[in-house]
Image (cartoon, rainbow, N blue to C red):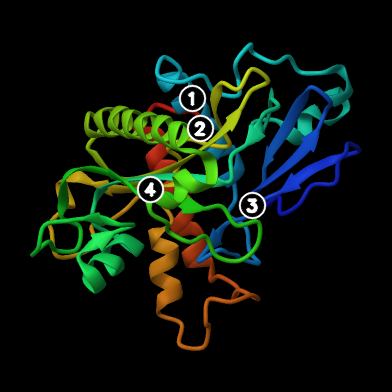
Amino acid sequence: MTVLLSTDLPFPVFRRGKVRDVYDLGAQLLIVATDRISAFDCVMPDGIPDKGRILTAVASYWFAATEDLVPNHFRGNPSWPAMLEPHRSALAGRAVVVEKTRPLPVECVVRGYLAGSGWKEYQAGGSVCGVPLPAGLRLADRLPEPIFTPSTKAEEGHDENISFEHMAEIVGADLATRLRDLSLALYRRGAELAAQRGILLADTKFEFGLGEAGDLILIDEALTPDSSRYWLADSWAPGKNPPSLDKQFLRDYLETLPDWDKQPPAPHLPPAIIEGIRARYLDLASRFGVDI
């Protein structure tokens, strides 16, 4: 199976992220989801077959499922410009045309369970991003209520967890409150729909931009296996990481490598790990009835 690790289209580059190549089409953006995958903020040298198409399809499902809560960058159903026609076959299933916004410099993370960096923070001080939590919680425990734990959005290097108060200093108190409330509402919608399909949405992150009128718009991706932690509900038990349908399979493998310090360059991935990631992403998509 072939993978797409990079694109070189004849349009101005807006930005190249860890996974997506974004091109400037004037009033619109072309977002191309490659098959790149990252972990610990490092892009792996090997791609995952079909990953870009899976992410695009899953994100589109969630944008449609949440558009009553907040507008997203598909607002107005941007048309497919004629200039893209020569590239349609190469971009099929992995590219979308969206409204251009001014991205906000924070990531909006919501956690419903204790895992990942949140678990490490809790072990160290009993709180996550300044949010105090009850004593005695275990790894993978369900939190009393979902919590909002924002982070910086680093162009390079590692994102950093920050407090809500720090976020308010960055974007302003009113906007920070709107971001928190919207993120919690989006998480609850995602968790509800996931639960109907035998999945627990442990945590997820959202990104927002501002439209021309200053209105908040959900951008980038939403509730994908790249940006979320999905657990199989029937295998969940506090005290251990449950089987997941996301990038945790990759992270767990990388944690076993004694010679990699989580800094570039990242190591090559064995075929079994590549196929294991692909199978989990496809499984998640199928549970939501998403065709690839």
Dot 3 or dot 4, earlier in sequence:
3
Amino acid type for the residue under numbered disc 1: Phe
In the image, residue 271 lies at what x, y percent? 53, 66
Residue pointed to by mark 1: 63
Q: Secondary structure at mark 3?
A: loop
Q: Secondary structure at mark 4?
A: helix
- Left or right of residue 148, residue 266 in this image: right
Q: Nearer the viewer, residue 102 or 11?
A: 102
Amino acid type for the residue under numbered disc 2: Ala
Q: Secondary structure at mark 1?
A: helix
Q: Residues within 10 Å of mark 1 (few under 14, many from 20)?
A: many
In the image, residue 250 lies at what x, y percent? 45, 64
- Left or right of residue 142, residue 55 in this image: right
Amino acid type for the residue under numbered disc 3: Met
Q: CA distance from mark 3 to mark 1?
A: 29 Å
Q: CA distance from mark 2 to mark 3?
A: 23 Å
- Residue 164 has which mark? 4
Q: Secondary structure at mark 2?
A: helix
In the image, residue 132 lies at what x, y percent? 20, 56
**Mark 4 and mark 2 residues within 8 Å of each other at the beta carbon:** no
Amino acid type for the residue under numbered disc 4: Phe
Residue pointed to by mark 3: 1
Q: Nearer the viewer, mark 2 or mark 3?
A: 2
Dot 1 or dot 4, earlier in sequence:
1
Q: How many marks?
A: 4
Query: Residue 149, relative to residue 72: is it above or below?
Result: below
